[in-house]
Image (cartoon, rainbow, N blue to C red):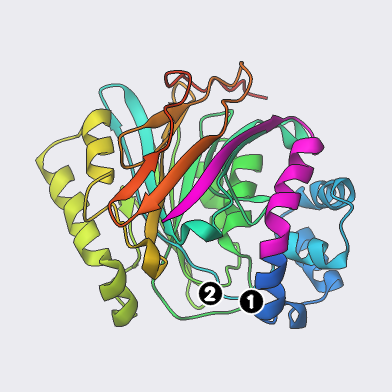
Amino acid sequence: MTSLSFRFLDEDAPGAAWREIVGHGWPGWREWFTTRNGEDGPNAKACRRAIRRHLPGFERLLDDLVEKASGDELLERFLTFWTPPRYLVNCTQLALSDAEGPLLIRNYDLDPGLNESTMFRSCWLGRQVVGMVEALAGLSDGMNAHGLAASLTFGGRVAGGRGFGIPLVIRYLLQFCRDTQDALSVLRDLPIHMSYNVTLIDPGGEVATVMLSPDRPPIVSRQAWATNHQLGVEWPHHGRMTRTLERAETLDHLLARKVPDEGELKKLFLSAPLFSPRYSRGFGTVFTTLYRPADRRVEIGWSDGTFVGWDLAAPPPAPVHVIYSANGSRVRAAPGAAPASANLSAS
């Protein structure tokens, strides 16, 4: 069995919480970066030039993040996530509007030991963002104060090239965009180093899934979901291993019948084939997150049915200890408070 302690961190400007994230995650990421020849990639000058050209506004934040973490040039290069080593996660995500309004729900699938297990509420550069930490400054999914929510999946293609890693892209979208249209404008011109799918929804209920690749233009779709392929399965072994088509068909059939409510979606995402307990193979469901853009509510849950919410006007919840086995994921001790809304103030 494997276990993780999920932490909930909260701070406005980079400081103690940011240093905790770096202290917790950088040793593992440094090893990943160096053993996969990341040191032989673009130098710090080239990485900064890419940030300046493609992600305007992030350079000032990058300087602050490196300084507050007492980081070196290697950390700076890593934080840009410009042409990093190959990086993929196998996830399922869905965005729709039910009777309560817009929502985004996703399963994050990976080896639990590789996840940073941190939900972080920040207000960097005056914009509140909450999401699951990925690659230190990046996010695997999240939502901002304006109610824009975004989530990533691997696109199931072997093509690679010069571009940004997707966790930094999710952070950038939530840090600088107000709605789905803003995010689409950014994604249409952004170089990406591998194939990924990004699903977006905003408080108005506008949904888009963008299929990003290093070797072809972005494909913008109004498809409400994404698994681990794009136009079709182009990496057969990976497609079979991750059951990407089976997961996609499950979502297609669900949406063809009716618009499911939140309870139905939670049950579906915590059941096969969307939920995977294959942790020993490195692709089990580590967590499920659900975002409500209209009322800024966020929850995180596991397959025993436990969901923890965070009222962001209150102190962060206590850490949640989760145990993973072939039977799924379960919280060792019930959290002390019932799920609460996440109230983000726009700025």
Instruction: Residue 214: give its label.
Output: 2
Gap in angstroms between the C-alphas marked 1 and 2: 7 Å
Q: Which residue is mark 1?
A: 162
Q: Where residue 345 sits in the image (x, y, percent)?
A: 62, 20
Residue placed at 19% from the left, 34% from the top?
259
The amino acid marked with disc number 2 is: Pro
Asked which secondary structure carries label 2, the reply is: loop
Residue placed at 58% from the left, 56% from the top?
167
Circle 1: is it few (<14), some (14-19), or many (20+) Cα within 10 Å?
A: some
Kindly check if marks 1 and 2 are in contact, taking CB atoms under 8 A apart as contact: yes
Q: Is residue 345 magenta?
A: no
Between 153 and 214, the residue placed more toward the observer is 153
Location of the C terminus by quadrant is: top right
Circle 2: is it few (<14), some (14-19), or many (20+) Cα within 10 Å?
A: some
Does residue 101 sit above or below 159 in this rendering? Answer: above
Does residue 159 sit above or below 130 in this rendering? Answer: below
Residue placed at 79% from the left, 59% from the top?
52
Q: Of label 1 and label 2, which has the lower sequence position?
A: 1
Q: Where residue 279 sits in the image (x, y, percent)?
A: 38, 61
* Residue 303 location, quadrant: top left
Q: Where residue 18 sits in the image (x, y, percent)?
A: 75, 42
Q: Where residue 220 sits in the image (x, y, percent)?
A: 40, 57
Asked which secondary structure carries label 1, the reply is: loop
Between 73 and 200, the residue placed more toward the observer is 73
Between 236 and 109, the residue placed more toward the observer is 109
Does residue 37 sit above or below 5 in this rendering? Answer: below
Query: Magenta segment, which residues?
Result: 1-28
* Residue 37 location, quadrant: bottom right
The amino acid marked with disc number 1 is: Arg
